[in-house]
Image (cartoon, helix red, strand yellow):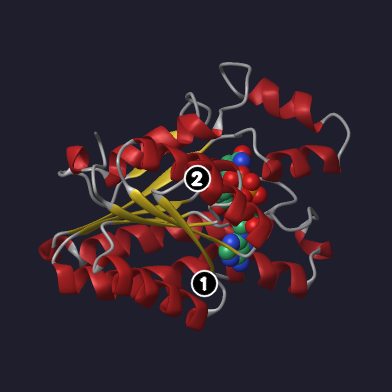
Amino acid sequence: MLLEDKVAFITGGGSGIGEATAKLFASEGANVIITDIDDVSGERVSNEIGSKATYLKCDVTNEEDVLAVINEITKTHSRIDCAVNNAGITGNPSNIEDTTYDNWFKVIHVNLTGVFFCLKHEITQMIKQGSGSIVNVSSGAGLIAVPSMAAYCASKHALLGLTKTAATENLSRGIRVNSVLPGSTKTPLLDQALNMSEGMEEIILNSIPSGKFGTPQEVAEGIAWLCSDRASFVSGASLAIDYGTVSR
Ligand SMILES: NC(=O)c1ccc[n+]([C@@H]2O[C@H](COP(=O)([O-])OP(=O)(O)OC[C@H]3O[C@@H](n4cnc5c(N)ncnc54)[C@H](O)[C@@H]3O)[C@@H](O)[C@H]2O)c1
């Protein structure tokens, strides 16, 4: 199996891409620690997976939460082999001139500062082990403009720089850091965005060469490969999983 006996930490694991990643990792032999701010969703995913999964509450914007969870995982499993920094939010859509500081701050805090807190403490543990693989979940919005989503777009662009820097700092330590850039993927987050304005579903579908949304499982496959030893020569990479949407 691709991830046999690996210990994997996943943020935002209670829904969408995080949920699919947790389920795929467990089916590939990993012990998964699902974290989320939503206990009901996190517990549900953990229960659906069974004995290979544990749920722990963790708000990625709270550094103490992140550190506590990482300490708990290392106490139980003595290591963290894989980390998937996936938790993210879109915020409310608006042009820049109408964007409130509150909306800007929330999105940057979850999508960027949250990943920074996770990276900081994951890398600290992985340095002790001398190994580890981390995947940050960016977005196609990390490469191209998305009108009315400035904070989201800025946070996802910034994640690519953060990923490359983390990868470069850790090349000699056996720790690989990569990012995935999902295209529009059918999850509650996308549904929420589609419901915000009329006709949005058709506009987005027309922008995808396959004419259909990706599935969370398709994104999870890329994350699993990057986390696995089969990607042993891959670090600092940004893997678009979008059926050619941003490369056209
Ligand atoms: N769905 C898409 O089309 C798409 C496209 C590109 C990138 N992404 C990215 O993929 C990631 C997952 O998105 P999704 O579509 O699965 O969304 P989702 O809303 O289905 O799941 C996100 C999960 O993150 C959790 N979360 C939110 N804030 C959190 C916090 N502060 N701490 C911990 N957990 C928190 C939520 O409770 C939820 O369970 C996000 O980073 C998103 O930006 C999604």
Question: Is residue 242 in view?
Answer: yes
Q: Is residue 80 left or right of residue 26?
A: left
**Around disc 2, counting alpha carbons within 10 Å, would you say few (fewer than 14), some (14 to 19), or many (20 or more)?**
some
Q: Looking at the picture, does residue 109 appear above or below residue 248? A: below
Give the mark nearest the N terminus, 2 or 1.
Answer: 1
Tag shown at residue 121: none
Residue 144's spot in the image, x, y percent? 55, 43
* Viewer-closest of 64 and 198: 64
* Marks 2 and 1, how far apart at CA: 19 Å
Residue in the image at 71% along x and 47% along y: 147
Type of amino acid under label 2: Leu
Type of amino acid under label 1: Thr
Secondary structure of residue under mark 1 = helix
Q: Is residue 175 left or right of residue 162?
A: left
* Viewer-closest of 57 and 48: 48
Do the CB atoms of the residues marked 2 and 1 lie less than 8 Å apart?
A: no
Tag shown at residue 143: 2
Kindly give the residue lying farthest to the front in the view shown: 51
Tag shown at residue 113: 1
How many numbered markers are drawn? 2
Residue in the image at 51% along x and 78% along y: 65
